[in-house]
Every structure is written in C-alpha cells, then in structure tokens.
Amino acid sequence: MPDGSFSHPQQRQFNPYTENGGTILAIAGADFTVIAGDTRQSEGYSIQTRYAPKVFRLTDRAVLAVNGFAADGNMFVKKVKQRLEWYRHAHAKDMPLRAIARLIQTMLYAQRFFPYYVYNILGGIEEDGSGAVYSFDPVGSYEREACRAAGAASSLVQPFLDNQIYFKNQTAAPGTSHPTHLPLPDVLSIVIDSFTSATERHIEVGDGLEMYIVLAKGRSAQSLEGMRGLQELSTRPDGDRVFVIRKELKKD
Amino acid sequence: MFPLTRADSFAQRNDDAFDAYGTYPLHQRAPHKDVFAEGVQHTQQPIVTGTSVLAIQYKDGIMMTADTLASYGSLARFKDVSRLHPVGTSTIVGASGDLSDFQYLQSRLDQLVTDEFTHADAHDLGPAEVHEFLSRVLYGRRSKMDPLWNSVLVGGFRDGKRFLGYVDLLGTTYSAPSIATGYGAYIAIPILREAVDGRQDKLSESDAKAILHDCMRVLFYRDARSIDKYQLATVTADGVHVSDAQPLDTSWGFAEGIRGYGAQTQ
C-alpha cells in the first residue's frame, strides 16, 4: 500500500478472553455466611442478558460465586461440581469447606499458564460451625477472610465493607469496642445497600440480585422467615442449611 | 560441578527480555519459533460471513430469522445462502460470522443427530442439549487458540418448554427472551426488548412474525452487510419449520427530497 501499512508484517492475535461485568460479594458471620451476586451479564456496552447466575450452591454448606470471563466461570464451576461429586461417591459425604477451598486453589493453579480469567469467592460453614469466606485470585492465591467483594464494582463495594464490617476509620464509643461479627439482618442490609449503590454508580451492575445464605447446623432460621423472595435449597433440614433470596435491581 | 538447570543449559544468553522459565500466561507470550508452525494454520479472521441473526420467544415456542446473504468482505458474494439449520425434531440453529466454520458445525450437528438416532434408545437431543454441545465445541476451540468464528443462536421447544440460547467464538453463553447477534445486538435488541421481554406468553405467531419482520427491515436499512431477503424459522409443539426465502418490503420514497439520498439535481 502507498501509505506503507503493509511494509511491516501485521499480526492480529486472537484474544481468548473477554470481561462480562457484574459484581459478587460475601460476608461471614459467627454462624452464617451470605454470598451474593448480581445477575446481569454484559460485554462492552451491551447487556447480553438480565439473568445469568454467578452464584452457585455446591453442597449444603458451600456456595461459590464466580466473576470475570463468563465462559471460563461456567466451565470452572462445572469442573468443581464434578470433583465434588466424585468426592461424594468416594467418601459418602460432602467435602468440607476448607478442603473445597484448597481444591479450588489447585484447580486454578493447574491453569497457571492459561488461567481461568475468573475471581472466585467461596462462602459457607466450616466444620467447627463458623461462617467462612475464602477469596481467590485467577491463579489460585487464596485466604480466609470475614468479607470480600470482587468484580466490576469491587473498587466501590470493598471500601464500604472495610468501613461497615471491619469498622475501619470508625472509633468505638469510650468504654466500648466494635463487634467482631454482625447479626444476620444487619449483614443482609449491608449486602442489599452494597448492590443498590453499585447499581447506581456502575453501568455493568444491575437487573437482579441473588443472595445465598448458609446457616450453621442448629442455628435458627427465624430472622429469615417472612422475607420476600426467599427459597430454601437444603437437601436436609437437620444439617447446615442453604437459602436464596432473589431481588430486583434497577435495569437501566 | 554444579548441575545445569534447564534455564542454564538451553538459554545461554544474557538477555533480560528472554523469558527463560516461561513465566508469562500463554496468550501474553511472544510468539515463539516453532519449526512446524508453517504446517499449522489457524483461523485468524472470518472470510465469507453472514450478518445478524435474531430470535425471540413467543406464546407457542420460538421464532428465529436471518437474511440469506453471504458476504466476502464488503462484496455481496452469495445471495441465497441459508443460515438457519434445523437439528433433530425440536431445535433450530442460526449462525452469523464465518460461514465455512458454520458449515463445519452443521456437519458436526448432523453427525451428532445420526449417532444419537442409531442408538435407538428412545432418547433424542433437545435444544438445551444442542446448545450445551455447541458451547463445548466453541469453548474447546477457543481454548486451543483456534476458534470457530461464529455467534450462534440455538432455539427450540420441547416438553412444553421454550429454549433460546446464545454461544460465540469465545464460548460465552447466555439465555434471554430475545437475542440478536452482530449489528442486531445494537439495532434490533432495543426494539425486541420493548416488544417481547415480559410478554412472551402473550405474543401470538402473527405478532412475533411482524416484530421480526420490522427488525429485519430496520437492519436492512442500516446494516451494509445485509440483504432484503430473509428466512423465518419457527419451533413449536408441531416441530421445526423453516420458511422459504422471502423478500423485505422497503420504501425509499422519503429519500427523494433529501440531498445525499435521492437523485441529485445540482
């Protein structure tokens, strides 16, 4: 070409990744965990669908939220569920939460040189009955935390959580101290506020909200009763129990 | 003396830019010199292409439409090519993007249906299974860095339930009441969401037909890779039906008085 555009060899490389927006979040309580995600799936400025779940029940005590590249996310969840099924057939019980966390680390790191472009947050109940959140980066680095936000609006939500859950930049009244764990109704309010706020300020967040609630064995579900959009997903009533609450978010 | 590590023995060079341990993710690494590379050619871009596919759910099932043009760049190369492909007795597949890749998918799907039929076990594939199959094939190929360059819609009606799903060259999938690929995602989706979403159980066949017809006309007006001839497929309890190619009615009378549209007078 006269403009010299062919004088250097051109190479256009296929990009095997994309970002599909959305945000996920999990908060651990003393004997419960809440794992939530919005249901919008987008690419660029287009909303692909208003309902594509990002949060998945794995067992009666473990829930996994995945966010990032949706195709990788779905494939990853499929493979984790398959490994948990094999475990169940081999050992006649569900895999404990901390073991699932280590399994996820191994599975992510196995793809170290062609990573799943996905941020994972695992939430549920530990074998000692405490609420737990494990957060991962795409290549498997992980830690147990009390709360974590990930995805498109993580930079909006995480500072809010630091303030409201860890009481960062707050001073307790003289002679008192901040609580280490919040009660379930407070946590649910914080989760809902996080997502309505993220929906306001981030274009990739909205449409619907799914909040999974895992309650430790023996804990009363009384504070959930009467909540709108509540559904129980547990397979047995006498162990750890899983609930989901579905809510609408703004669609613009 | 000291045992030689792999990095020592193979990379005898003092070059900071050389990534001796291959620490970068595959897709970020510099293209390495492979002596066999010239024998392996991967699809790097689509060649003969189809434009948008549109599909919606309606009262009796799903309806899908695509025009009949196969473009070679900006050349309208083949003007009577079908981009809607029935699979089994309850599924329709529509594709945009590279048409040779789509023809490969067609042969894979036909093979799949034949294999399933020869089992003679009273099972056959519905739209959800076809969608799952396609998403695995496309995701598998993207993971080999050798993608099938398509955006595919899968629609169907089985056991009294509608199914409408999407899958593309990256393996990205989703379901929705109305879906469009290509320029349709920008031009037709706003019209379809307004007319369809939340009203799927009420829309009659003639409503659905009219909505899609309107969208195809708008697309023909604005999409330079489209043609005024399209096919319409319906999947209902009665099975799959793909129409013959039918013309679009267009009106250009308005252009007469607009400079730049109609014949110029000065």
Image: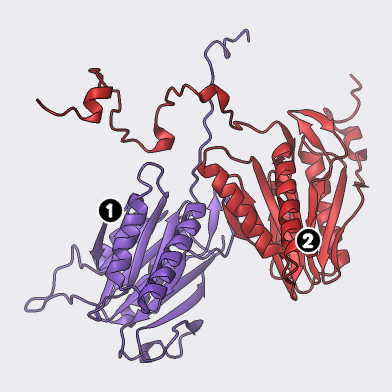
| Whether residue A196 can be seen here | no
**Residue B114 figure quarter:** bottom right
Chain A: give its colour: purple
Q: Position of residue B150 (x, y in %)?
A: 66, 43
- Residue nearer the viewer, A247 or A133: A133
Residue ID at (52%, 53%) = A71
Residue ID at (33%, 67%) = A100
Residue ID at (37%, 41%) = A113
Establish whether labels 1 and 2 are both on one chain.
no
- Considering the image in quadrants, where does the N terminus of chain A appear? top right
Q: Secondary structure at mark 2?
A: loop
Residue picked out by circle 1: A141
Q: Position of residue B133 (x, y in %)?
A: 63, 56
- Residue nearer the viewer, A170 or B135: B135
- Identity of the amino acid at label 2? Gly
What separation in Å lies between label 1 and label 2 (alpha carbons)? Answer: 45 Å
Name of the residue lying farthest toward the top: A2
Q: Is residue B20 above or below residue B187?
A: above
Left or right for B147, reference A20? right
Chain B: give its colour: red
